[in-house]
Amino acid sequence: MRQMRLFVAVDVSAEVTARAARIIDRLREAGIEAAWVAREQMHLTLHFLGDDVDDADLHRICLAIDEAAATVPPFRLDFGGVGVFPDAARPRVAWLGVHEGAAELGRLHAALAERLTPLGFPPEARVYRPHLTLGRFRGGRGSAGAGSDRLVAALEACRDADGGSASVQRVCLYESRLAREGAEHDRLHAAPLRG
């Protein structure tokens, strides 16, 4: 048996990843340093299953994802606005916000939680806030611009950034492998939305 790091996500369009990459470039040009997400790795996470999921559980997990996907019809996402979690004084994650489709993502997140929790994969304790991760800050405040006036100014300059749109037709199970260059994600399963 093999242990796997798994998460459930929806893919985003090439338009969204291209616009997100341009926003990242603007933040870099403003002197903000972070572990930026590569375009080909961008996705919108719905449910993190864990770092040590047994591959023997894959079949049951895929069935649960199929059931959840059957409860929500395809929908549209519109992205825009940039911010950080938890706040600019203690940034950990830079994100691109979701303007349209957040309610549908919330329903999909709840449907997944309802079906995955009995299998031993409850959702994270914090409130689900849909977003596209742009980058992660290491070390909090400091010369990287995190927690600084420079970060606040850069975020303000990108506040109204248009992140594009994506049509969500399916939900996917991914395996994440941590590599020196960053995480690499392999799609293991895709379930069409049919609600």
Image (spheres, rainbow, N blue to C red):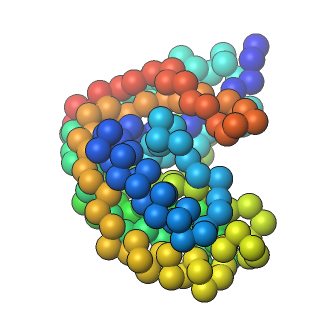
x then y, percent, for residue 40? 47, 35
Q: Is residue 58 visible?
A: yes
| Residue appearing at x 75%, y 36% in the figure | 180
| Closer to the camera in the image, 4 or 79 | 79
Q: State the image coordinates of residue 145 (x, y, percent, origin top left).
A: 66, 74
Q: Tell whether 170 sits left or right of 148.
A: left
Relative placement, left or right, of 69 versus 44 is left
Quadrant of the image for the N terminus?
A: top right
**Height in image: 189 above or below 68?**
above
Residue 67, quarter of the rendered image:
top left
What residue appears at the point 53 percent right and 42 percent down from the top-left corner? Answer: 38
In the picture, the quarter occupied by the C terminus is top left
Relative to 162, say whether 70 is above or below.
above
Q: Residue 91 falls in which quadrant of the image?
A: bottom right
Residue 79 versus residue 119 in the image, above or below: below
Which one is nearer the viewer's eye here, 170 or 140? 140
Residue, x 32% and y 73% (percent of image)?
A: 160
The reply to whether residue 68 is in sight is no
Q: Nearer the viewer, residue 115 or 152?
A: 152
